[in-house]
Amino acid sequence: QVQLVESGGGFVQPGGSLRLSCAASGFIFSRNAMRWYRQAPGKGRELVADISSTGSTTIYADSVKGRFTISRDNTKNAVYLQMNSLKPEDTAVYYCNTLILITPLWGQGTQVTVSS
């Protein structure tokens, strides 16, 4: 079954950290670039971070540069998002994403809430 399953979300105070994980199955993971998106309440879905198939190239949204780190383990078919120095404006549902040929594949999302 072709799918992405996110985990690791939760409630954290400002300044805290979380690590999101995305487990991939049903496709050749090592050939795919992977992305993390997020969607805050009442807003559109935005790209947070992108990592190339080998992990050699990463791209970040300006809003998370220096705080978030995307990584992957092609031996485990997994991609991660380490989030540090979290802010209330990082509150959102975070989604893992890739393209299967030209079709976007999305996970179910994991909620991250940053609040004091």
Image (spheres, rainbow, N blue to C red):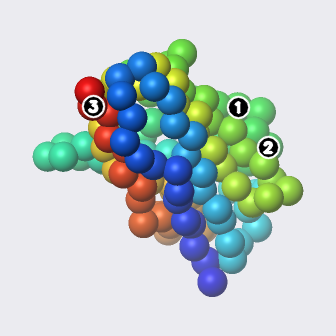
Three-letter residue code for mark 2: Thr
Residue linked to disc 1: 57
- Left or right: 78 with respect to 19? right
Three-letter residue code for mark 3: Ser
For the N terminus, which image quadrant? bottom right
Mark in front: 2 vs 3: 3
Q: Pick whichever, 31 or 69, lies toward us.
A: 69
Residue at x-position 46% and y-position 25%: 16
Helix, strand, or loop for circle 3?
loop
Residue at x-position 79% and y-position 43%: 54
Residue linked to disc 2: 54
Residue 115 marker: 3
- Left or right: 20 with respect to 45? right
Does 77 sit above or below residue 66? below
Horizontal and vertical percent for residue 86? 41, 25
The total number of labels drawn is 3
- Left or right: 105 with respect to 29? left
CA gap, disc 1 and disc 2: 8 Å
